[in-house]
Image (tube, helix red, strand yellow):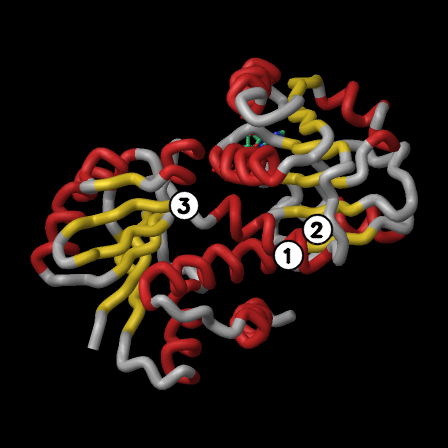
Protein backbone atom coordinates (compact mmCIF):
# COMPACT_ATOMS: atom_id res chain seq x y z
CA UNK A 1 0.00 0.00 0.00
CA UNK A 2 1.19 3.52 -0.78
CA UNK A 3 0.45 6.66 1.18
CA UNK A 4 -0.34 9.91 -0.63
CA UNK A 5 -1.64 13.21 0.66
CA UNK A 6 -1.91 16.96 0.56
CA UNK A 7 -0.10 19.44 2.82
CA UNK A 8 -1.55 22.87 3.50
CA UNK A 9 -2.64 25.19 6.32
CA UNK A 10 -5.58 25.22 6.84
CA UNK A 11 -6.50 22.00 5.03
CA UNK A 12 -9.69 20.63 6.61
CA UNK A 13 -11.91 21.66 3.67
CA UNK A 14 -9.75 20.05 0.99
CA UNK A 15 -11.66 17.88 -1.48
CA UNK A 16 -8.50 16.14 -2.66
CA UNK A 17 -8.72 13.17 -0.21
CA UNK A 18 -12.23 12.14 -1.27
CA UNK A 19 -11.42 12.69 -4.96
CA UNK A 20 -8.24 10.59 -4.93
CA UNK A 21 -9.48 7.88 -2.56
CA UNK A 22 -12.61 7.28 -4.67
CA UNK A 23 -10.41 6.91 -7.73
CA UNK A 24 -7.94 4.55 -5.96
CA UNK A 25 -10.89 2.39 -4.98
CA UNK A 26 -12.49 2.36 -8.42
CA UNK A 27 -9.18 1.48 -10.08
CA UNK A 28 -8.38 -1.19 -7.47
CA UNK A 29 -5.22 0.62 -6.28
CA UNK A 30 -4.25 -0.37 -2.70
CA UNK A 31 -3.39 3.24 -1.76
CA UNK A 32 -4.62 5.87 0.65
CA UNK A 33 -4.66 9.70 0.37
CA UNK A 34 -4.92 11.91 3.43
CA UNK A 35 -4.85 15.63 4.34
CA UNK A 36 -1.98 16.83 6.54
CA UNK A 37 -2.34 20.19 8.27
CA UNK A 38 1.24 21.49 8.27
CA UNK A 39 2.04 24.79 9.97
CA UNK A 40 4.59 26.86 7.98
CA UNK A 41 7.11 26.44 10.85
CA UNK A 42 6.94 22.67 10.31
CA UNK A 43 7.29 22.56 6.54
CA UNK A 44 10.87 21.23 6.47
CA UNK A 45 10.01 18.60 9.11
CA UNK A 46 7.01 17.54 7.02
CA UNK A 47 9.19 17.05 3.95
CA UNK A 48 11.79 15.13 6.00
CA UNK A 49 8.85 13.05 7.23
CA UNK A 50 7.79 12.34 3.66
CA UNK A 51 11.21 10.77 3.07
CA UNK A 52 11.33 8.94 6.42
CA UNK A 53 7.82 7.51 6.10
CA UNK A 54 8.17 6.78 2.38
CA UNK A 55 5.08 8.79 1.48
CA UNK A 56 4.94 8.27 -2.29
CA UNK A 57 3.34 11.53 -3.36
CA UNK A 58 2.05 14.82 -1.99
CA UNK A 59 0.02 17.70 -3.28
CA UNK A 60 1.06 21.06 -1.92
CA UNK A 61 -1.37 23.90 -1.36
CA UNK A 62 -1.61 27.32 0.29
CA UNK A 63 0.63 28.56 1.90
CA UNK A 64 3.45 26.12 0.99
CA UNK A 65 3.64 26.14 -2.81
CA UNK A 66 6.68 28.43 -3.04
CA UNK A 67 8.41 27.70 0.29
CA UNK A 68 8.47 23.94 -0.28
CA UNK A 69 10.77 24.27 -3.31
CA UNK A 70 13.79 24.83 -1.06
CA UNK A 71 13.49 21.34 0.46
CA UNK A 72 13.12 19.24 -2.69
CA UNK A 73 15.84 17.46 -4.70
CA UNK A 74 14.63 18.48 -8.12
CA UNK A 75 12.12 20.94 -9.61
CA UNK A 76 10.80 20.25 -13.10
CA UNK A 77 10.70 22.88 -15.87
CA UNK A 78 7.00 23.79 -15.58
CA UNK A 79 7.25 24.31 -11.81
CA UNK A 80 10.45 26.35 -12.24
CA UNK A 81 8.74 28.61 -14.75
CA UNK A 82 5.66 29.02 -12.57
CA UNK A 83 7.84 29.48 -9.50
CA UNK A 84 5.72 27.14 -7.38
CA UNK A 85 5.17 23.42 -6.74
CA UNK A 86 1.82 21.73 -6.23
CA UNK A 87 2.94 18.10 -6.66
CA UNK A 88 5.81 16.11 -5.13
CA UNK A 89 6.77 12.64 -6.29
CA UNK A 90 8.97 10.43 -4.14
CA UNK A 91 11.21 8.44 -6.48
CA UNK A 92 13.19 6.08 -4.22
CA UNK A 93 13.89 8.84 -1.74
CA UNK A 94 14.45 11.55 -4.35
CA UNK A 95 11.77 14.22 -4.09
CA UNK A 96 10.76 15.78 -7.40
CA UNK A 97 8.57 18.90 -7.49
CA UNK A 98 6.24 19.71 -10.35
CA UNK A 99 3.23 21.93 -10.97
CA UNK A 100 0.01 20.67 -12.55
CA UNK A 101 -2.11 23.79 -11.93
CA UNK A 102 -1.44 25.49 -15.27
CA UNK A 103 -1.72 22.35 -17.38
CA UNK A 104 -4.79 21.35 -15.36
CA UNK A 105 -6.42 24.66 -16.23
CA UNK A 106 -5.45 24.30 -19.90
CA UNK A 107 -7.06 20.84 -20.03
CA UNK A 108 -10.26 22.17 -18.49
CA UNK A 109 -10.32 24.93 -21.12
CA UNK A 110 -9.76 22.41 -23.93
CA UNK A 111 -12.80 20.50 -22.65
CA UNK A 112 -14.87 23.65 -22.86
CA UNK A 113 -13.63 24.77 -26.30
CA UNK A 114 -13.54 21.94 -28.80
CA UNK A 115 -11.20 23.66 -31.27
CA UNK A 116 -7.73 25.24 -30.95
CA UNK A 117 -7.79 28.74 -29.49
CA UNK A 118 -4.40 30.09 -30.52
CA UNK A 119 -6.11 33.06 -32.21
CA UNK A 120 -7.82 34.36 -29.05
CA UNK A 121 -7.00 37.42 -26.98
CA UNK A 122 -7.17 36.44 -23.32
CA UNK A 123 -7.97 38.61 -20.31
CA UNK A 124 -6.74 37.34 -16.95
CA UNK A 125 -8.12 39.09 -13.86
CA UNK A 126 -5.75 38.83 -10.90
CA UNK A 127 -1.99 38.46 -10.64
CA UNK A 128 -1.47 36.09 -7.70
CA UNK A 129 -0.21 32.50 -7.54
CA UNK A 130 -3.10 30.90 -9.42
CA UNK A 131 -2.87 33.54 -12.12
CA UNK A 132 0.86 32.91 -12.60
CA UNK A 133 0.30 29.17 -13.18
CA UNK A 134 -2.46 29.83 -15.69
CA UNK A 135 -0.80 32.58 -17.69
CA UNK A 136 2.39 30.50 -17.94
CA UNK A 137 0.44 27.53 -19.34
CA UNK A 138 -1.64 29.70 -21.71
CA UNK A 139 1.43 31.58 -22.95
CA UNK A 140 3.31 28.33 -23.58
CA UNK A 141 0.26 26.91 -25.40
CA UNK A 142 0.33 30.07 -27.51
CA UNK A 143 -2.57 32.52 -27.66
CA UNK A 144 -2.70 35.78 -29.55
CA UNK A 145 -2.22 38.04 -26.50
CA UNK A 146 -2.61 37.84 -22.73
CA UNK A 147 -3.73 40.99 -20.91
CA UNK A 148 -3.46 40.91 -17.13
CA UNK A 149 -5.74 43.21 -15.13
CA UNK A 150 -5.24 43.55 -11.42
CA UNK A 151 -6.23 45.77 -8.50
CA UNK A 152 -2.51 46.30 -7.85
CA UNK A 153 -1.23 47.17 -11.32
CA UNK A 154 2.42 46.71 -10.37
CA UNK A 155 1.84 43.00 -9.71
CA UNK A 156 0.19 42.65 -13.12
CA UNK A 157 3.20 44.38 -14.70
CA UNK A 158 5.62 41.92 -13.09
CA UNK A 159 3.56 38.99 -14.33
CA UNK A 160 3.21 40.42 -17.84
CA UNK A 161 6.98 40.76 -17.99
CA UNK A 162 7.28 37.05 -17.16
CA UNK A 163 4.72 36.16 -19.85
CA UNK A 164 6.60 38.17 -22.50
CA UNK A 165 9.25 35.38 -22.51
CA UNK A 166 6.69 33.35 -24.44
CA UNK A 167 4.40 35.80 -26.23
CA UNK A 168 2.53 39.12 -26.20
CA UNK A 169 1.31 40.37 -22.84
CA UNK A 170 0.22 43.69 -21.28
CA UNK A 171 -0.70 44.78 -17.78
CA UNK A 172 -3.82 46.94 -17.67
CA UNK A 173 -5.96 48.59 -14.99
CA UNK A 174 -9.30 46.89 -14.19
CA UNK A 175 -11.18 49.91 -15.61
CA UNK A 176 -9.45 49.59 -18.99
CA UNK A 177 -10.25 45.85 -19.07
CA UNK A 178 -13.93 46.63 -18.48
CA UNK A 179 -13.97 49.14 -21.32
CA UNK A 180 -12.42 46.80 -23.89
CA UNK A 181 -14.09 43.59 -22.70
CA UNK A 182 -15.53 42.93 -26.16
CA UNK A 183 -12.01 42.47 -27.60
CA UNK A 184 -11.37 39.26 -25.61
CA UNK A 185 -12.31 35.73 -26.65
CA UNK A 186 -11.45 34.25 -23.25
CA UNK A 187 -11.82 35.94 -19.84
CA UNK A 188 -10.60 34.28 -16.63
CA UNK A 189 -11.18 35.37 -13.04
CA UNK A 190 -8.31 34.13 -10.84
CA UNK A 191 -9.13 36.36 -7.84
CA UNK A 192 -11.19 35.32 -4.83
CA UNK A 193 -13.79 38.03 -5.56
CA UNK A 194 -17.26 36.44 -5.47
CA UNK A 195 -16.21 33.47 -3.37
CA UNK A 196 -18.55 32.44 -0.56
CA UNK A 197 -19.60 34.28 1.61
CA UNK A 198 -19.15 37.38 -0.61
CA UNK A 199 -21.66 36.15 -3.17
CA UNK A 200 -22.78 39.47 -4.76
CA UNK A 201 -19.23 40.66 -5.53
CA UNK A 202 -17.93 40.73 -9.12
CA UNK A 203 -14.23 41.08 -10.10
CA UNK A 204 -15.13 43.45 -12.98
CA UNK A 205 -18.15 45.09 -14.55
CA UNK A 206 -19.26 43.06 -17.60
CA UNK A 207 -21.39 45.66 -19.34
CA UNK A 208 -19.35 45.33 -22.56
CA UNK A 209 -19.21 41.51 -22.62
CA UNK A 210 -19.96 40.00 -26.06
CA UNK A 211 -22.19 36.98 -26.64
CA UNK A 212 -20.19 33.77 -27.22
CA UNK A 213 -17.16 34.86 -25.12
CA UNK A 214 -15.58 32.11 -23.01
CA UNK A 215 -15.77 33.20 -19.37
CA UNK A 216 -14.18 31.10 -16.66
CA UNK A 217 -13.88 31.54 -12.93
CA UNK A 218 -11.44 29.51 -10.81
CA UNK A 219 -13.88 29.66 -7.89
CA UNK A 220 -15.99 26.53 -7.24
CA UNK A 221 -17.59 27.69 -3.98
CA UNK A 222 -20.25 28.67 -5.05
CA UNK A 223 -20.39 26.57 -8.22
CA UNK A 224 -21.73 29.58 -10.08
CA UNK A 225 -20.42 32.97 -8.95
CA UNK A 226 -22.32 36.18 -9.67
CA UNK A 227 -19.67 36.85 -12.37
CA UNK A 228 -20.53 33.56 -14.13
CA UNK A 229 -24.29 33.99 -13.67
CA UNK A 230 -24.28 37.47 -15.18
CA UNK A 231 -21.91 36.41 -17.98
CA UNK A 232 -24.20 33.51 -18.85
CA UNK A 233 -27.20 35.86 -18.96
CA UNK A 234 -25.27 37.84 -21.58
CA UNK A 235 -24.74 34.73 -23.73
CA UNK A 236 -21.21 33.79 -22.63
CA UNK A 237 -19.96 30.19 -22.47
CA UNK A 238 -19.07 29.73 -18.82
CA UNK A 239 -17.10 27.33 -16.64
CA UNK A 240 -16.37 27.20 -12.92
CA UNK A 241 -13.21 26.08 -11.10
CA UNK A 242 -14.15 22.41 -10.74
CA UNK A 243 -12.53 21.57 -14.09
CA UNK A 244 -9.15 22.97 -13.10
CA UNK A 245 -9.33 21.35 -9.66
CA UNK A 246 -10.10 17.92 -11.13
CA UNK A 247 -7.49 18.13 -13.88
CA UNK A 248 -4.66 19.34 -11.64
CA UNK A 249 -5.45 16.38 -9.37
CA UNK A 250 -5.66 13.96 -12.28
CA UNK A 251 -2.28 15.13 -13.60
CA UNK A 252 -0.71 14.63 -10.14
CA UNK A 253 -2.27 11.13 -9.98
CA UNK A 254 -0.78 10.34 -13.37
CA UNK A 255 2.68 11.56 -12.33
CA UNK A 256 2.61 9.38 -9.20
CA UNK A 257 1.15 6.18 -10.61
CA UNK A 258 1.75 6.35 -14.35
CA UNK A 259 -1.93 5.82 -15.10
CA UNK A 260 -4.55 8.36 -16.11
CA UNK A 261 -7.55 8.41 -13.77
CA UNK A 262 -11.14 8.84 -14.93
CA UNK A 263 -11.70 12.60 -14.82
CA UNK A 264 -15.46 12.34 -15.43
CA UNK A 265 -15.79 10.16 -12.37
CA UNK A 266 -13.56 12.52 -10.38
CA UNK A 267 -15.77 15.44 -11.43
CA UNK A 268 -18.86 13.57 -10.21
CA UNK A 269 -17.18 12.89 -6.87
CA UNK A 270 -16.26 16.56 -6.43
CA UNK A 271 -19.69 17.83 -7.49
CA UNK A 272 -21.37 15.43 -5.08
CA UNK A 273 -19.16 16.69 -2.28
CA UNK A 274 -19.95 20.30 -3.24
CA UNK A 275 -23.64 19.54 -3.39
CA UNK A 276 -23.95 20.45 -7.08
P1 LIG B 1 -3.95 32.91 -5.30
O1 LIG B 1 -2.73 32.12 -4.93
O2 LIG B 1 -5.23 32.16 -5.00
O3 LIG B 1 -3.91 33.43 -6.68
P2 LIG B 1 -3.08 35.41 -4.16
O4 LIG B 1 -1.71 35.07 -4.60
O5 LIG B 1 -3.28 35.93 -2.79
O6 LIG B 1 -4.02 34.14 -4.27
O7 LIG B 1 -3.72 36.43 -5.25
C1 LIG B 1 -4.97 36.96 -5.07
C2 LIG B 1 -5.34 37.81 -6.30
O8 LIG B 1 -6.68 38.24 -6.14
C3 LIG B 1 -4.52 39.06 -6.45
O9 LIG B 1 -4.43 39.39 -7.81
C4 LIG B 1 -5.36 40.09 -5.69
O10 LIG B 1 -5.15 41.44 -6.10
P3 LIG B 1 -3.94 42.31 -5.47
O11 LIG B 1 -2.71 41.89 -6.20
O12 LIG B 1 -4.31 43.74 -5.75
O13 LIG B 1 -3.90 41.99 -4.00
C5 LIG B 1 -6.74 39.67 -6.10
N1 LIG B 1 -7.76 40.10 -5.14
C6 LIG B 1 -8.02 39.54 -3.95
N2 LIG B 1 -9.05 40.19 -3.34
C7 LIG B 1 -9.44 41.17 -4.19
C8 LIG B 1 -10.46 42.19 -4.16
N3 LIG B 1 -11.30 42.30 -3.12
N4 LIG B 1 -10.58 43.01 -5.23
C9 LIG B 1 -9.75 42.90 -6.28
N5 LIG B 1 -8.77 41.97 -6.37
C10 LIG B 1 -8.62 41.11 -5.36
Disc 1 on helix, strand or loop? loop
Measuring 60% from the left and 31% from the top, which residue is drawn there? 126
**Horizontal side of residue 212 vs 126, given as left or right:** right
Residue 52, x across and y down, in percent = 8, 57
Measuring 55% from the left and 76% from the top, which residue is drawn there? 265
Q: Badge 2 local density, few (<14 within 10 Å), some, or many (20+)?
A: many
Disc 3 on helix, strand or loop? loop
Ligand 1 found in image quarter? top right
CB contact under 8 Å: marks 2 and 3: no
CB contact under 8 Å: marks 2 and 1: yes
Q: Earlier in the sequence, mark 2 or mark 3?
A: 3
Q: Is residue 226 visible?
A: no
Q: Quadrant of the N terminus?
A: bottom left
Residue 135, x across and y down, in percent = 58, 34
The numbered mark at residue 99 is 3
Residue 46, x across and y down, in percent = 17, 49
Disc number lying in front (3 or 1) = 3
For mark 2, what is the residue?
Answer: 225
Residues under labels 2 and 3: Cα distance?
Answer: 26 Å
Q: Badge 3 local density, few (<14 within 10 Å), some, or many (20+)?
A: many
The numbered mark at residue 22 is none
Disc 2 on helix, strand or loop? loop
Residues under labels 2 and 1: Cα distance?
Answer: 6 Å
Q: Is residue 96 visible?
A: yes
Residues under labels 3 and 1: Cα distance?
Answer: 25 Å
| Residue 190 quadrant | top right
Q: Observer-nearest residue: 127 or 135?
A: 135
- Ligand 1 has an atom within 8 Å of the beta carbon of the residue at disc 3: no
Q: Observer-nearest residue: 97 or 274?
A: 97
Q: Quadrant of the C terminus?
A: bottom right
Q: Observer-nearest residue: 178 or 37?
A: 178
For mark 1, what is the residue?
Answer: 222
Amino acid sequence: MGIFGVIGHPISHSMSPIMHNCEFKKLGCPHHYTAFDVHPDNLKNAIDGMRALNILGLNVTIPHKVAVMEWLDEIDEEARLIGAVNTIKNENGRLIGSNTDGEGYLRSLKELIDHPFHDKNVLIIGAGGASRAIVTALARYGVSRIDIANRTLQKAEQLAMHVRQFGKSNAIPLKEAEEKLSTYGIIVNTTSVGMSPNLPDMPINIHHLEKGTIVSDLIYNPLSTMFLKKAKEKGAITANGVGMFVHQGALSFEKWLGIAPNTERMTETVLKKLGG
